[in-house]
Image: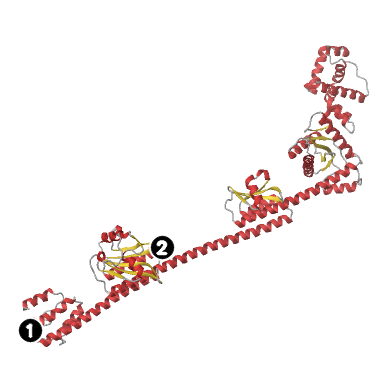
């Protein structure tokens, strides 16, 4: 080799030692052959630069001993350089692994950690592409999870069947596999889908290492080049380390996901426990409230109000007829509250008898414990209804026994009678009316008729209890003793009672009333006589065809006069012609005498004027005045008969002859 050629090589080689600095045959400041190579090591020169000192020494004709020493120093320097590069590479690898481990320790986002692993693997191995696939146990295949350096969309979206491609071989054997030329390697099964994706990406050399969790392969980490390449043992080991970290990251993420899921389950369980605890507390609260209501004699509406507060809704007690029929029957059959649209219905029963229902309004979502609370409230309601019924029946019997004693005059000690009445909130010194009531809807069935009579007695007893009166079953009907309010009449009371009882039993009820009586214990037969008068009035109403109506003797005109136990002649006269008598007394007229003459002459005005010796126009004017006082129907046969009887009784009671004509 010529000197010019050597000098040209020195200029061409980067980092070459110049002749002045390392001239053959001379000694450097250190005086050894290793000096130029130490300088090259210090500068980090490329491997080809280490040939320059040897070439230059040979070109200058340096002694063979010197050239041999330079050769030995070169080899030693190259070995040192290789060792340094290996250390630097391992330092970089360890640093990358440490950073990855640090990322894993602070795992927040699994995708970010996996992306960092793939990026660092690609950078350290110096490959064109790196990617990671994971197995999908649900679909039974594997899919691309992370890619770095990929440019083909089809490759990035690959889903591979188990056992297909190089990744399938890695998954089957749980060992790393490498290929210098993918398309010429027949160790694994090629498929059209995989080959098309690899071809689109332009990959040639591929290295794959398994991601292991215990003894199970969960995926594969790949590094690939678009040219033929031989992957070294250290690179395979490095990629395996990254795969181990990736598997650890996935395992950690799964554990975190399971932990979060477990925590969420615990939170839900805690919420359920708290909710159940609240429901149990509410149930305990309603139990205490219901117990208190029962002890202090509360009613069904008090129960509904208490349950409404506990269940935070509106609870109502309804009669069986007003509740949803299907839901009510289901609740009755099952013994539980049932849902009806947005409401809940709990049947209130006593044995086979349906008493009503508790209805929770607008509360479709009901906790089982709250449902049980509603059912318990329905049970308490049935107990209260039965207790109230028993108390009412007992009170009815007591009221009936007292009225029986008044009617039969068995216990005539006024003091005892008053004490018994006071316990029933009845005042025997007040003015009362005795009413006889009877059903008109007769039936051939004896059981049905007996049931109807019981219903009539129950309705009458309830009415008597609410009006501070008495009631008893007697003579195939019911007798009531009711106080007469100020301004009220026996007729009004009889009519109201007939309407009330008829509505309660859904059948016509006829009611006859006595005249008002007071001081019921003054005479032994006071109540019995009034009851006899009420029965006569009842019989008269039925014979007159006024079934289902109510009336007193005073409403039946002269018939009532005949029926009355004590003949109230003055009252009959006053009710019939009292206004005419009063008019005569105020004005000094003779309307009463004119009426007498009018009826005596056969209701002929012409004959009347002859009897009275007045002009016929005078008779007409007087009769017109009578019509205005007594009503337009005063000349009807029934009214005319009553007016004539009243005129006759008026004359008899006056005991004075008619006055002279005016």
**Which of 1/622 is in front?**
1
Instruction: Tell me the element at label 1.
Output: loop
Residue at the disc numbered 1: 61
Instruction: Tell me the element at label 2.
Output: loop
Q: Position of residue 560 (x, y in %)?
A: 85, 29
**Which of 346/100 is in front?**
346
Q: Position of residue 423 (x, y in %)?
A: 83, 49
| Sequence-first disc among 1 and 2 | 1
Q: Is residue 487 visible?
A: no
Q: Position of residue 638 (x, y in %)?
A: 82, 23
Left or right placement of residue 7 versus residue 221 in this view: left
Q: Quadrant of residue 629?
A: top right
At 26% from the left edge and 60% from the top edge, which residue is drawn? 199
Alpha carbons under labels 1 and 2: distance apart: 73 Å
**Which of 625/506 is in front?**
506
Q: Quadrant of residue 615?
A: top right
User: Which label was assigned to residue 137?
Assistant: 2
Quarter in which the N terminus is drawn: bottom left
Quarter in which the C terminus is drawn: top right
At 74% from the left edge and 40% from the top edge, which residue is drawn? 504
Q: Residues within 10 Å of mark 2 (few under 14, many from 20)?
A: few
Contact between labelled residues 2 and 1, with CB atoms less than 8 Å apart: no
User: Which label was assigned to residue 470?
Assistant: none
Q: Position of residue 348 (x, y in %)?
A: 68, 50
Left or right placement of residue 366 versus residue 453 in this view: left
Q: Is residue 414 above or below residue 253?
A: above
């Amino acid at each position: 080799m010529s000197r010019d050629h050597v000098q040209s090589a020195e200029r061409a080689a980067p980092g070459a030692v110049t002749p002045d600095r390392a001239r053959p045959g001379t000694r450097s400041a250190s005086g050894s052959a290793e000096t130029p190579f130490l300088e090259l090591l210090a500068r980090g020169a490329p491997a080809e630069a280490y040939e320059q000192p040897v070439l230059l020494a040979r070109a200058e004709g340096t002694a063979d001993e010197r050239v041999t020493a330079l050769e030995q120093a070169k080899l030693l320097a190259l070995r040192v350089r290789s060792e340094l590069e290996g250390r630097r590479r391992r330092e970089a690898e360890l640093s990358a692994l440490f950073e990855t481990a640090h990322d894993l320790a602070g795992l927040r986002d699994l995708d970010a950690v996996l992306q960092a692993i793939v990026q660092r693997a690609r950078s350290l191995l110096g490959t064109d592409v790196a990617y990671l696939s994971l197995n999908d146990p649900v679909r039974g295949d594997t899919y691309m999870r992370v890619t770095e350096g990929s440019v083909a969309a089809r490759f990035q979206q690959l889903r591979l069947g188990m056992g297909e491609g190089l990744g399938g071989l890695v998954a089957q054997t749980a060992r790393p596999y490498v290929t210098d030329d993918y398309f010429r390697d027949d160790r694994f099964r090629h498929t059209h889908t995989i080959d098309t994706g690899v071809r689109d990406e332009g990959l040639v050399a591929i290295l794959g290492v398994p991601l292991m969790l215990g003894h199970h392969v969960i995926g594969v980490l790949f590094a690939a080049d678009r040219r033929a390449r031989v992957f070294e043992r250290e690179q395979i080991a490095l990629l395996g380390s990254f795969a181990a970290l990736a598997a650890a990251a996935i395992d950690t993420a799964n554990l975190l996901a399971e932990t979060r899921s477990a925590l969420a389950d615990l939170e839900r369980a805690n919420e359920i426990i708290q909710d159940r605890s609240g429901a149990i507390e509410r149930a305990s609260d309603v139990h205490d409230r219901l117990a208190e209501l029962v002890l202090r004699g509360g009613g069904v509406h008090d129960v509904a109000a208490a349950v409404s507060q506990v269940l935070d809704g509106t609870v109502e007690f309804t009669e069986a007829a007003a509740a949803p029929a299907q839901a009510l029957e289901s609740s009755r059959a099952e013994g539980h509250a049932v849902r009806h649209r947005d409401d809940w219905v709990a049947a209130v029963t006593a044995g086979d008898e349906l008493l009503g229902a508790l209805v929770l309004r607008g509360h479709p979502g009901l906790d089982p414990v709250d449902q049980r609370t509603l059912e318990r409230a329905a049970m308490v309601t049935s107990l209260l209804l039965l207790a109230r019924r028993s108390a009412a029946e007992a009170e009815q019997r007591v009221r009936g026994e007292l009225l029986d004693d008044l009617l039969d005059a068995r216990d005539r000690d006024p003091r005892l009678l008053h004490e018994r009445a006071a316990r029933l909130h009845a005042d025997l010194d007040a003015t009362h009316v005795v009413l006889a009531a009877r059903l008109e809807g007769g039936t051939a069935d004896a059981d049905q008729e007996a049931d109807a009579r019981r219903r009539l007695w129950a309705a009458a007893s309830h009415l008597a209890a609410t009006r501070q009166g008495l009631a008893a079953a007697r003579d195939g009907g019911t007798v009531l003793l009711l106080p007469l309010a100020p301004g009220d009449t026996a007729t009004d009371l009889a009519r109201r009672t007939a309407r009330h009882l008829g509505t309660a039993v859904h059948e016509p009820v006829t009611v006859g009333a006595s005249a008002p009586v007071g001081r019921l214990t003054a005479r032994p037969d006071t109540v019995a006589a009034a009851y006899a008068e009420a029965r006569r009035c009842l019989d008269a109403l039925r014979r007159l065809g006024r079934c289902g109506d109510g009336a007193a003797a005073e409403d039946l005109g002269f018939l009532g006069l005949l029926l009355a136990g004590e003949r109230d002649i003055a009252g009959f006269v006053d009710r019939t012609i009292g206004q005419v008598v009063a008019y005569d007394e105020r004005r000094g007229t003779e309307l009463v005498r004119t009426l007498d003459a009018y009826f005596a002459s056969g209701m002929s005005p012409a004959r009347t004027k002859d009897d009275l010796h007045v002009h016929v126009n005078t008779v007409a004017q007087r009769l017109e005045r009578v019509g205005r006082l007594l009503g337009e129907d005063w000349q009807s046969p029934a009214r005319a008969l009553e007016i004539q009887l009243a005129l006759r009784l008026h004359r008899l009671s006056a005991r004075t002859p008619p006055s002279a004509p005016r």
